[in-house]
Image: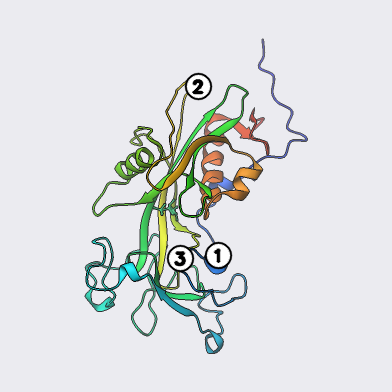
Amino acid sequence: MTEQKDNHQHISSLVSSGFETTNRIQFHTKAMTETVEGYPERTSLPKGVTWQTLDRQNYHPAEYTAEKLLGDTPPVWADPQDISKLPHDFISYEGEVEFDTNGRPLNPIGPTGITGRGVLGRWGANFAVDAIVTRINIDGFLEMVTIQREDGGEFATPGGFVDENEETTHALQRELEEETTATLSFESATPVYTGYVDDPRNTDNAWIETNAYHRHLARGVIIPLEGKDDARDARWRTINKELLEELYASHAFNVKKAIALWGKKEGKIVDSEGKVLNSTK
Ligand code: RP5
C-alpha cells in the first residue's frame, strides 16, 4: 500500500519554511519592554534601536543591580561590582564584546533602558542551557516538556545557568532533572541554537546567552514529570500556535528552530495545531 502523502495545499505550518537556516535573534522586545520583580521602569526606546542608532543625548536609563549581588558577601557565582576586578574575560556567542566609556560590556543586540546587572550575576553574557524534549502523542500531535516558572508563572523550556567549567550536555541533563525529575542524556541530542536570549532580565550591561539542544523521544518512551526547584509545574504540552505565543523569553524561537531541523531530517511538517504531517518535499 503506498503511503498516503498528506495534502498540504491548505494547511498552515507552525514554522515558516526555511526557518532551520535562521541563526540568530536580530532584535529584542522583551529585554526592552518587560521587567521582573525589583526592576525599575525601563526608559522607553524605539523598536529595533541599536547602539549605532541610539539618540544618546536623550538616553537616560535607570541603573539597577540587585542588592543580593552587592555588599560584602555576594553569591559565589556573581561578579564583583567593580568591573576592574573581574575574574573572567568577556566572551559572547554573538561575537566581539563592545564596551561603554566606563568599561562596561554592552548588550550585543542593543540598549534595553536599564544599566547595571539587574539580577544577573555576571557583567556581560550569563551562560545558560535550554532542553527541548519532544514526542508525538497517541493522537499524532507534537508535544514538548514544559515547566511553569516559579518566578513569573510563565511556561518555558527546562533550562538554567551553566556552572563554572560545566559541560553543556551535563548542564542540560542536570537542569532537566532539577526542574522536572526526568533523567535524560543529551550526549546525542541535536544542537539547535547558540546565542542571545531575549529575556526580561537583560540590561545594557548584562544579558543571557544559551545553548538550546533538542531530543525527540521515540514513541512509547515514558518520562516522569514533576515540577521542582525553580519550576512550580512540569508537564507535556502540545506545541501549537498558542503555546509558542506564550512561551517565556525567546524560547519560541528555539522551539521553532528545533521543529524546523527535526522536520527537515524526518520529512515531517507540523501544522499550527501541532499535528505532525508527512512532508511532500
Ligand atoms: C532564559 O532563562 C534561558 O533561556 C534559560 O531558560 C533561563 C535561565 O534562567 P533561570 O531559569 O535559571 O532563571 O533566559
Q: Is residue 9 above or below residue 70?
A: above
What percent of the width, then of the height, locates residue 232? Answer: 46, 44
| Residue 15 seen | no
Going by the numbered disc 1, the residue's amino acid type is: Glu
Instruction: Report helix, strand or loop for mark 2.
Output: loop
The residues bearing labels 2 and 3 have C-alpha atoms spaced at a distance of: 38 Å
Marked residue nearer the N-terminal end (3 or 1): 1
Where does the N terminus fall, quadrant-wise? top right
Q: Residue at x 73, y 32 (%)?
A: 8
User: How many other residues sit within 10 Å of disc 2, few (<14), some (14-19) or many (≥20)?
Assistant: few
Residue at the spot of label 2? 219
Pointer 2 or 3: first along the chain: 3
Q: Distance from label 2 to label 1 (Cα)?
A: 38 Å
Taking depth in this image into account, of 5 and 105 the one nearest to the observer is 105
Residue at the image position 50 percent from the left and 71 percent from the top: 110
Q: Residues within 10 Å of mark 1 (few under 14, many from 20)?
A: some
Q: Residue furthest right?
A: 10
Residue type (three-letter) at the residue carrying disc 3: Asn
**Residue 34: mark:** 1
Residue 157 in the image, given as x and y percentages of width and height: 48, 44
The secondary element bearing badge 3 is classed as loop
Question: Residue 162 vs residue 114: left or right?
Answer: left
Classify residue 139 by image quadrant: top right
